[in-house]
Image (tube, helix red, strand yellow):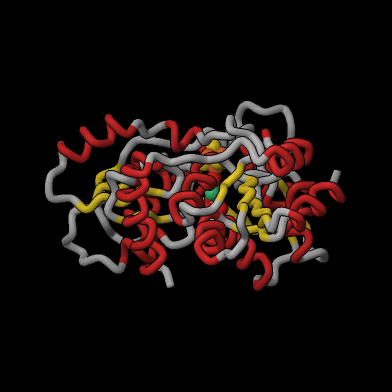
Amino acid sequence: MKESILRLKKEKNALIMAHYYQRDEIQEIADFIGDSLALARKAAETDADIIVMCGVHFMGETAKILCPDKKVLVPDMGAGCSLADSCDPEEFRHFIEQHPGHTVISYVNTSAAVKALTDIVVTSGNARKIVESLPKEEKIIFGPDRNLGGYINTVSDREMVLWPGACHVHDRFSLEKILELKKAHPGAKILVHPECRKPLQLIADKVGSTAALLDFAGKDDAKEYIVVTESGILREMRLKCPEKVFLPAPAEDSECQCNECDYMKLNTLEKVYRCLRDESPEITVDPEIAREAIKPIERMLEMSL
Ligand code: 13P
Ligand code: SF4
């Protein structure tokens, strides 16, 4: 399967991109692996004819908005995102109307229609920097992740108005089980994605995007880490730091020791092969929405240089 994918990729001048939460075997065949920000940046600069986005739908949509002339394929059109789904464009428009005079900042985990209503898009990798670059008195709406928005409000001393959305994966980590794990591994540092709830952010040694957590683990001198984000990231952490131990953090309602995003895990090697072979499913974005949605994405790329 891997050989067939690599052959097709060469024949079609395709670029295979994968998010850190993808299955190991997909990360193994990807040309590029990254967080949401890196995937958007890479899409903006590639000269491939086809982009295969192994991640979730909004990542494919962002790539298509940035590269309207390229074919953007996703292995499974059903790979959505509970956080993006927690923000309906019409309800978000109404929310904006209720807060006149506010700058609208949206997390990249949103539909193109929500981005089209937005002034600046951010990812977890640049949200703090972008918010802090705005004047302190600027009134801001931040959507859709209430945990990331709350984190920035705390660390940047802001009072952004938050849309009450959340990711079903990050919102269900168990503080209790993580504290038990810490008891068993007292030397382990705790790495937390900012989509997690505040109590988890408070016990973290590092709060950051997937790329920031990887970077921290690479430079830090601890030997063990409790990783409080989707467990797909463990592959890259173990590859980068083979001498260190990375422990997945358990979810509240789960019997197993890790926490996976069902949407991210919908993509399989076979689906990657089929989508390259058939050049389908293909991401399309309404051109009128794309014309509006590209502005806040480009603003993000300029502001996070
Ligand atoms: P990153 O931007 O940190 O990779 O996060 C993407 C995501 O979907 C987190 O759940
Ligand atoms: Fe969306 Fe959460 Fe899955 Fe990330 S982990 S893609 S935010 S549902």
What is the quadrant of residue 281 in the picture?
A: top right
Could you tell me if residue 194 is visible in this image?
no
116 relative position to 203: left or right: left
Q: Position of residue 144 (x, y in %)?
A: 37, 41
Quadrant of the rendered image containing residue 286: top left
Ligand 2, what quadrant? top right
Name which residue lies at 18% across and 50% down. Answer: 102
Residue 37, compared with residue 289, is above or below; it is below
Q: Is residue 246 left or right of residue 164?
A: right
Residue 262 appears at what percent x and percent y? 64, 32
Residue situated furthest left in the rendering? 100
Residue 128 in the image: above or below residue 18: below
* Nearest the eye: 185 or 104: 104
Q: Residue at x 64, y 46 (%)?
A: 54
Q: Quadrant of the N terminus?
A: top right
Residue drawn where x is 63% and y is 34% of the image = 76
Q: Nearer the viewer, residue 101 or 185?
A: 101
Out of 297 and 142, give the one closest to the viewer.
297
